[in-house]
Image: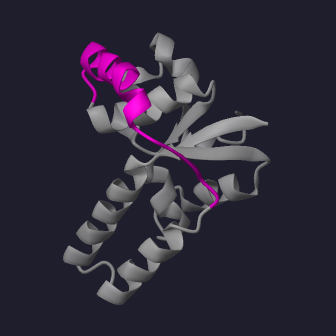
Amino acid sequence: MKTMIVDASVAIKWFVPEIHAITALRLLDMPVRLMAPDLIFAETGNILWKKWRRKELSLPDAAAILEDFKQMPLDIAECEPLVEIAWQIATGYDRTFYDSLYLALAKSENGKMVTADRAFYNALHKEALGKSLLWIEDISKP
């Protein structure tokens, strides 16, 4: 079974109708192992907080999404074992450490990181790391 690492830019689309949401939802029906570093809880919570602050979501709706998110079929990996690889990615490619943790997990699990973060994808997809990275609209071709 293939392993797909889902970042928060993809996971939020399971709950909030945004561009690429239909494609993100397809991931849940694919015969793949879905994983994320434990950082995804903080990042998803922060996205929901921002949407609440901008009045895109009510407080009860944002809280309900956060609670539902905890029930998603994700295998969660601890960040600590990924720190060295993530640091090399972050400093070697001038990417955030947060985003680099997802890609480090993809490398360590021999999987692919699925992202809807266009800037991150564009910065790395042509690099050697690109084989561990997948644009959200390409998920039907893992």
Q: Which residues are magenta?
A: 73-95
Say whether residue 13 is left or right of residue 60: right
**Quadrant of residue 4 in the image?**
top right
In percent of the image, x 20 and y 75: which residue is there? 53
* Image height of 64 relative to 138, above or below: below
Magenta-colored segment: predominant secondary structure: helix
The question of residue 137 being in magenta is answered with no
In percent of the image, x 53 and y 55: which residue is there? 20
| Residue 79 visible in image | yes
In percent of the image, x 45 and y 13: which residue is there? 127
In the rendered image, the quadrant that contains the C terminus is top right
Q: Residue furthest left?
A: 53
| Residue 120 visible in image | no
Observer-nearest of 19 and 73: 73
Q: Position of residue 136 (x, y in %)?
A: 55, 44
Q: Position of residue 72 (x, y in %)?
A: 59, 64
Say whether residue 46 is left or right of residue 128: left
Marks counted in the figure total 0
In percent of the image, x 79 and y 36: which residue is there? 1
* Image height of 1 relative to 131, above or below: below
Q: Position of residue 62 (x, y in %)?
A: 37, 78
**Quadrant of residue 64 in the image?**
bottom left
